[in-house]
Amino acid sequence: MSVEQPLWRALTGYRVLTAGYAVALFVVGYEGHARPVPGMAFMAVLVVWTLATLGRVTSPRRCTRGFLFVDLGIALTGILLTPFVETHQRIVDGGPTLPSIWTAGSVLAFAIKGGWRWAAAASCLVGGANMVERGALARDTVHNVLLVAIASIAIGYVVEVARASERTLARALQIEAATRERERLARDIHDNVLQVLAMVQRRGTEIGGEAEALGTMAGEQEAALRALISGGPTALSGVPGPRDADADPDTPRDLRVLLTPFSSTRVTVAAPGTPVLLPAHAAAELAAAVGAALENVRKHAGERAHAWILVEDAPDAVLVSVRDDGPGIPERRLADAEAEGRLGVAQSIQGRLRDLGGTAELVSVPGQGTEVELRLGK
């Protein structure tokens, strides 16, 4: 149930009770009115309007702007009509206006419907009407107007906070429900699909031949699926998706999310248990550099080479190393490749880090593999 719904019910009761109170005041002081007929006509309109519009003040959907303005108009009309009904002495002595405290119900309706700003605007109109009715800025008039204004503004602010809290709670409940469903699916996948894929991989390796290739594919799918269910609702690519392309490049993004999809049977990703946050553009470029390093492993170390990605989140920088167990890079190979126009390492890796203000170092020992260390300051 909405937090503000009890306020609407209370407002409904308030309007009925205050309409009855205004009529009772008029009847008790009937003999003292200078012109009771206009007052009787207004009281009839007030009672009929209050009873006919009870359904209007039961929810924000039914309490429209048009209704609010008409309702406030009736209250202002009653205030401005008071000098034509009451004697001047009675007004000077601080006698109540024709709608009396029923007017506060109109202001409170503005507060519950539109928040404290609407309440402040309606209070100003009521205050102006009261000063016109008294013909002077009397102390009791200021006191009553301020009391209504402060109460309505406070209620309007509370309503705004309650609505914001409801939206936050609804979002949290949606996330919780989605998380529980995802955990349930993850359990089912782990208990069934992942075990089948692991068995296919193991049996394919044992049988050999075409079955081994099938087992390798099953192993890769197992790793990708395991990364998906453990990494959360993220994309299976290190390249930013359509939403990310339009996002603020300075918006923090978890580097682990971009590197996890690289995990497979031959690529191991080791990252901290806490998010490694970088600006979205920097995280995407760093992940792309890692992808380029892995592509070099595939091309030059062979399909059977293993690679390890290690992510370190230091206080002043993020370090990412990509190591493989390939044959290594012969001396002068990188210089010769750059001279021949093949700029994979120089541009795709070192160039990206240089543009980000970071560094990329490559260490290779023939026969012992290659390690690329990427360093990006925070």
Image (spheres, rainbow, N blue to C red):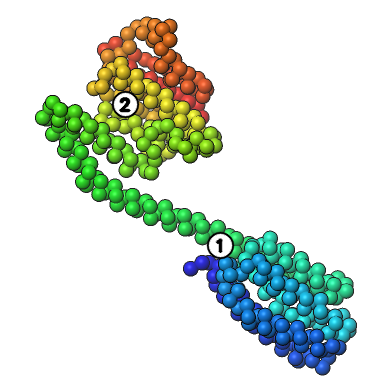
The numbered mark, 1 or 2, whose residue comes first in the sequence reads: 1
Q: Is residue 171 above or below residue 5?
A: above
**Mark 2 element type:** strand
Residue at horizontal 48 percent and vertical 18 percent from the top = 351
Question: Do we see residue 335 in this rendering?
Answer: no
In the rendering, at what x and y percent does residue 272 appear? 38, 35
Residue hosting label 2 = 308
Report the side of 370 relative to 61 (left or right). Answer: left
Residue at horizontal 30 percent and vertical 30 percent from the top = 268
| Viewer-nearest residue: 314 or 36 | 36
Residue hosting label 1 = 162
Q: Is residue 349 above or below residue 314?
A: above
Amino acid carrying label 2: it is Trp
Report the side of 286 relative to 8 (left or right). Answer: left
Cα–Cα span, label 1 and label 2:
50 Å
Report the side of 13 relative to 39 (left or right). Answer: left
Question: What is the quadrant of residue 307 in the picture?
Answer: top left
- Dots 1, 2 in contact, CB < 8 A: no
Give the mark count.
Answer: 2
In the rendering, at what x and y percent does residue 315 appear? 47, 31
Tag shown at residue 110: none
Residue at horizontal 49 percent and vertical 29 percent from the top = 282
Report the side of 83 relative to 52 (left or right). Answer: right
Residue at horizontal 16 percent and vertical 36 percent from the top = 200
